[in-house]
Structure formats: C-alpha cells, structure tokens
Image (tube, helix red, strand yellow):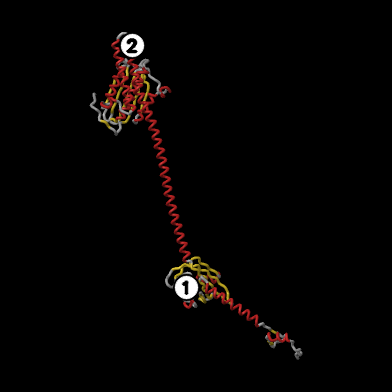
Amino acid sequence: MERAPMADPTSAERHAIDCVHESVAPVQQPLLVTIEDPAQRKRVEAALAASEVRYRRLFEAAQDGILLLDAGAGQVIDANPFLGDLLGYSHDEMVGKGLWEMGPFKDWEASRAAFRELQHKKHIRYEDLPLETKQGKKISVEFVSNVYSVDGEAIIQCNIRDITDRKRAEEELHALHLDLDRRVQERTAELACANLALQQEIVGRERAEARERRVVVEERTRIAREIHDTLAQGFTGIVIQLEAAEEVLARDPQAALGHLLRARALARESLVEARRSVWALRAQDLETEDLAYAFLHLIHKLDNGSGTQITFALEGIPGSMSQDIEHQLLRIGQEAVTNALKHAKPTQIRVALTCRRDSVALSIEDSGEGFAPDSPAYQRGPGVRGMRERAAGVGGAIDHHQLARRGDSRGSDTAVSSPKRSCSWRRPARSRF
C-alpha cells in the first residue's frame, strides 16, 4: 500500500517535528508509533538525582547510626559515618560483612535468632542493647530494624542510637531516688523515734503527775490519820481523867488533883506527838525503846484512872522489825484500845503482841458491849478506816469481830498480822522484858 503524499509543513509544524523524535517500527497490523519527550525525561532524571543527593546527605549527616543489610544474606551493604565513629570501625571494615561477624555484634548470642525474627516479622526493637566498640568501650544503644524493598530486593535498615549518656543519667537519677528514699526512710524512722520518745515523755510526765497527786493525797491522809490517832486518842485519855476527877472531887480532892495532873500530862504528850506526826517522825517511845515497851507505856497512860484493867502479853522477842511496822502497829493498838475505852465500856482489855521469825501479830481483846462489824457507821468510821490503811501500808491485814462469851456479856477482838520486812532493820534497844 502506497503512503499518501504529505503537504508541506508549516513553520510551526516544522518546529514541532524538530523537537520530536519519530520512531517507526515494522509491526503487523495495526501500526504502533511511540513518541517520547526528551525534556520531561531529563527533568525526571534531574529530580531523581537531586532526591538521591538529599537522602544521601541525610544518611551521611544523621546523628544516629544507620546500617543497611542485605535481607537475604545479612551482609552489610552500607553504613553511615556516625555509626563508624560510634563503633570505631571504618566504612570498609563494616561493608560486606555479616552482622554477627562484626566486632560489636559477634558476642551477641541472639544475633542470628534476631535476624531470623526480623526476616519473619519485618521489625524488631531493643530498648537497651549493650555493645562494645573497637576500643573495648561498653556502650548502650537503642536498636530498631525495619525491612523494606528497593528495586525488588529486601533491604534491612538498622537505626542505632547511642543512649549511654541517657542511661547513665537515668541510673544516676535512679540512684538519687534510692538515696532520697533511704533518707526519707531514715528521717521517718528518726521522726517515729522522736515521736515515740515524746509520747513516752508525755506518759512519764502524766505518771509522775499522777504519782505526785497520789503522794499528796497519801500525805494528807497520813497527816489526818496521825492527827486523829494522836490528838483524838489523847483527848479520849484526857476526858477519861477528867471524868475520874469529877467522880472523886467531892470526897477526895487529892485524888481528883492527881487525875487533873495526868490529864494535863496527856494533853502535853498529845501535843508533842501531834507535832511529831505532822513531820512524819516516829512515836517518841520508839526512838529509844522497842515496841513492847511502847505498848506498856501506852497502857500505863490509858489505864491510870480509867477503871478498866488493861493487860499486855508478849510472845517472842520484838526485834528485827522495820521501823514502819513498829510505828503502824503501835498506832493501830492505840486506836483499838482507845475505841474500846470510849465506846465499849469494858472492864478488861488484853493487848497481846506475838513476834515470830517472819511475821508479827497484834491482838486487842476487850470485854465490853461489842459492836456490829458490818454496820455502815462502823465501816465509815475514821478510826477503823485508819487502822485498815495502816495495816495495808505494811502488807498486813486487820480483822474485827465480836466475841461470844458466857451469859449476857459480849466483847470484841481486833487482830492485825503483818510480815516482817527485810529492809530498814533496827536493832532494838535493850528490852525491859
């Protein structure tokens, strides 16, 4: 088939023809004509070259290590300068070697397994991977690997970031936190100890104040008891002597005068004993004599002119007894005899002191009208309460009970027993018995 004749081209058409390369290839029906624009191809090639330059500069200027591996064999294709400076290896010492053949990774036991895992998962990451540089320096890196395709070939890109300084800072910060925790715990323990000491001090002060209040109360009770046992009992003796003087005054003035003189003597003695009691001094008779003599002197004062026969019996030797026990027993006996003279109207009173090796007992028995030990008036009486307090103060006990006698007569018995004390022993003066 003949080609149709073409008309002469215009100038514009001639210009277009000059810029277009025409290629004609013999083909079977139909005819294929390909037209390429050289300018466009140059622009694409220039853009590609510029892109390669930019990425190359990014690769070389990156401040993280970048390692490119062949995904199939695991050999190093390329490495950026930062990685060489980080590990101390030149570019030639890294390129062409397997990852596990390189110095920093050859001791990495899991390198081959990690490579297989990367081939399978396409991505692995290690937050803190220890490496060793060519110079033997230990460093810590963050290791991130990805797999991607270039021209149909799988490439592994490993990004390696030096975190040695950051890890050291984190370790220092952790150490500071531990030290701070330790300091806080120590300070907390110190504050707890101080708080405990303060609480103990408060408790100690409260106890001391309680003891002080108790001592004050005990001292007030003691003074009241001593005043009662000296003045009140002295007044009882004085009243007895005055009543005796009144009875004999009309028929025997001389005898009445004797009772008045004894009343005056009792008043003076009671005043002296009251003053001594206030100052917590022992009875005057106990300063120079033993307990038995003190009872005899007491009985002599109360018996004289009372009309009541008062006797005293002693069993054992009244020695090796603490001063406190002697004093309390004398006051208990004085109170019991005085109460019997004042309330029971007895004809006889018997005082018995029994001294054993490890205990002492005192019994005051009278032949009077008796009493009801359980009556409220008796229980609340200051004399009975004082006797109980005195007995308890020396570790003893006191017992009051009525005595059943023949006929209509009744009586009472007051008994107190106390253990001897192993402290404050006093060698008695020469006994008069």
Whole-percent x and y of residue 343? 37, 18
* Front residue of this view, candidates 332 and 261: 261
Whole-percent x and y of residue 278? 34, 27
Residue at point 34% right, 16% down?
240
* Front residue of this view, candidates 13 and 255: 13
Which residue is disc 1 drawn over?
85
Reply above or below: 405 against 54. above
Q: Amino acid at mark 2?
A: Glu
Whole-percent x and y of residue 207? 40, 37
Q: Is residue 281 visible?
A: yes
> Label 1 to label 2, Cα distance in Å?
135 Å
Q: Amino acid at mark 1?
A: Asp
Whole-percent x and y of residue 219? 37, 30
Mark with earlier residue (1, 2): 1
Question: Which residue is the extreme one toward the top?
Answer: 251
Which residue is disc 2 drawn over?
247
